């Protein structure tokens, strides 16, 4: 349904909480606070901006690297958990496999089919990373060239690109990549603190799954994560409480003003325990974790609604937690009409009950079926 209608509740607007009524079609047309809901706050639905996930590999048993309509399936699966916009994320692979994934993503980016989250573009997580910090990426890394990136960018728009800045000529590429409108993120890197600072000075915008797949916080030999804590405005973090200890999450929240959250979700998301694809590799979901056969973490089974609940469980108030799964990722991409509830913004909304469980999702005015 995308015709004109209303939603009533406690609304987290662009300027704070109000009680009232949203008037919307595909976009928010008015916020009426003159006739607030008479029920107690405990009984009133919570209406938040839809979640924006900038690191999604899969869901519902499907991996984006499969190409074809896989991205559409993944975007439908995540929409049911409140994600209203996302970046389809690739794995390190041979170029032909990356091209196949981008061709599939191009179709999903060009047209939002019913029931889907909006696919805003691509997060190219590999192959321009360090062989020393692969994490769950396969050993198919290559050094980037501007021509390589331009060729891939022409297939489907790359909005974020993970780069190890210490490799070859990567540092020198950052200004040109930024000029293409690509947010360069530092990650899967064996670089030093100095490498991280130099990359930020060259125009790098963020960090990929902070603390994971990068040199860390050593007081004698500080690494990429230390550069993030000391200097970053933005960084993504996986708040499944498995990838990063709660103490380290709290440290990052104090240090990085616009730390935002991602799922790094795999095909195992929303599925029972078992074996699933992650690019050319097989991963195993068991007891909520997704791992390689070696036991290493390999993405997650996290959804953004659970990410929000996890943040609140760490002590964040709901408005702050909401910003980190909606507004800040939108701001990071330079998007001003998503990630917030404001007049003329897209009607991307998630309705929660008092336990922060999803009760309704709206994507560009369309009600998403939750089952």
Image (cartoon, helix red, strand yellow):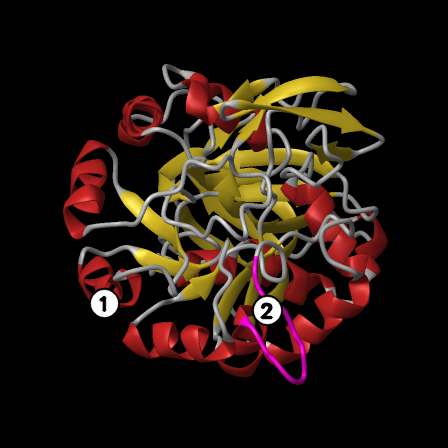
Tell me what residue is drawn at x 52 percent, y 64 percent.
Answer: 235
Q: How crowded is mark 2: few (under 14 residues within 10 Å), some or many (20 or more)?
A: few
Q: Does the magenta stretch include residue 222?
A: yes
Q: Local crowd at mark 1 within 10 Å, few (<14), some, or many (≥20)?
A: few
**Residue 16 vs residue 156: left or right?**
right
Q: Quadrant of residue 275?
A: top right
Q: Nearer the viewer, residue 210 or 133?
A: 133
- Residue at the (48%, 45%) spot, across then down: 23
Q: Residue furthest top?
A: 68
Per the image, label 2 sits on a secondary structure element best described as strand
SS majority, magenta = loop
Q: Can residue 58 be seen in this view?
A: yes
Residue hosting label 1:
172
Label 1 SS: helix
Report the front residue among 110 and 340. Answer: 110
User: Which portion, as a residue range, is magenta?
Assistant: 214-223
Residue 256 at what x, y percent from top left?
57, 75
**Residue 259 in picture, x, y percent from top left:** 57, 66
Q: Magenta stretch: residue 110 in it?
A: no
Q: Position of residue 172 (x, y in %)?
A: 23, 67
In this rendering, the answer to whether 77 lies above or below 132 is above
* Looking at the image, residue 214 lies above or below residue 69: below
The residue tagged 2 is 16
Q: In the picture shown, does residue 346 fall above or below 279?
A: below
Left or right position of 313 against 91: right
Count of labels in the image: 2
Q: Position of residue 11 (x, y in %)?
A: 62, 56
Give the left or right position of residue 58, taking residue 196 as reference: right
């Amino acid at each position: 349904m995308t015709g004109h209608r209303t939603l009533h509740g406690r609304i987290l607007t662009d300027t704070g909480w109000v009680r009232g009524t949203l008037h919307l079609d595909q976009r928010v047309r008015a916020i009426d606070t003159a006739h607030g809901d008479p029920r107690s706050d405990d009984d009133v639905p919570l209406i938040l901006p839809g979640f924006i996930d900038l690191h999604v590999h899969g869901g519902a048993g499907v991996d984006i690297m499969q190409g074809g309509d896989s991205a559409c399936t993944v975007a439908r699966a995540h929409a049911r958990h409140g994600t209203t916009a996302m970046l389809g994320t690739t794995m390190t692979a041979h170029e032909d496999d990356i091209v196949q994934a981008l061709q599939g993503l191009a179709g999903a980016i060009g047209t939002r089919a019913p029931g889907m989250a909006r696919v805003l573009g691509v997060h190219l997580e590999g192959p321009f990373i360090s062989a020393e910090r692969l994490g769950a990426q396969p050993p198919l890394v290559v050094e980037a060239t501007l021509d390589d990136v331009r060729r891939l960018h022409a297939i489907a728009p790359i909005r974020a690109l993970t780069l190890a800045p210490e490799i070859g000529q990567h540092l020198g590429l950052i200004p040109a990549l930024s000029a293409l409108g690509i947010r360069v993120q530092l990650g899967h890197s064996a670089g030093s603190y100095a490498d991280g600072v130099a990359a930020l000075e060259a125009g790098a915008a963020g960090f990929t799954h902070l603390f994971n797949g990068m040199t860390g916080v050593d007081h004698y030999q500080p690494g990429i994560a230390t550069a993030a804590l000391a200097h970053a405005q933005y960084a993504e973090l996986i708040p499944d409480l498995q990838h990063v200890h709660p103490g380290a999450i709290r440290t990052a929240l104090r240090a990085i003003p616009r730390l935002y959250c991602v799922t790094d979700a795999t095909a195992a998301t929303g599925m029972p325990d078992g074996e699933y694809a992650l690019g050319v590799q097989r991963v195993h979901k068991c007891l909520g974790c997704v791992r390689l056969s070696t036991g290493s973490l390999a993405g997650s089974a996290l959804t953004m609604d659970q990410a929000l609940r996890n943040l609140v469980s760490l002590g964040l108030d709901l408005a702050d937690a909401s910003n980190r799964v909606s507004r800040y990722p939108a701001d990071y991409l330079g998007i001003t009409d998503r990630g917030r509830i404001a007049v003329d913004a897209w009607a991307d909304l998630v309705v929660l009950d008092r336990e922060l469980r999803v009760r309704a999702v709206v994507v560009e005015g369309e009600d998403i079926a939750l089952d």
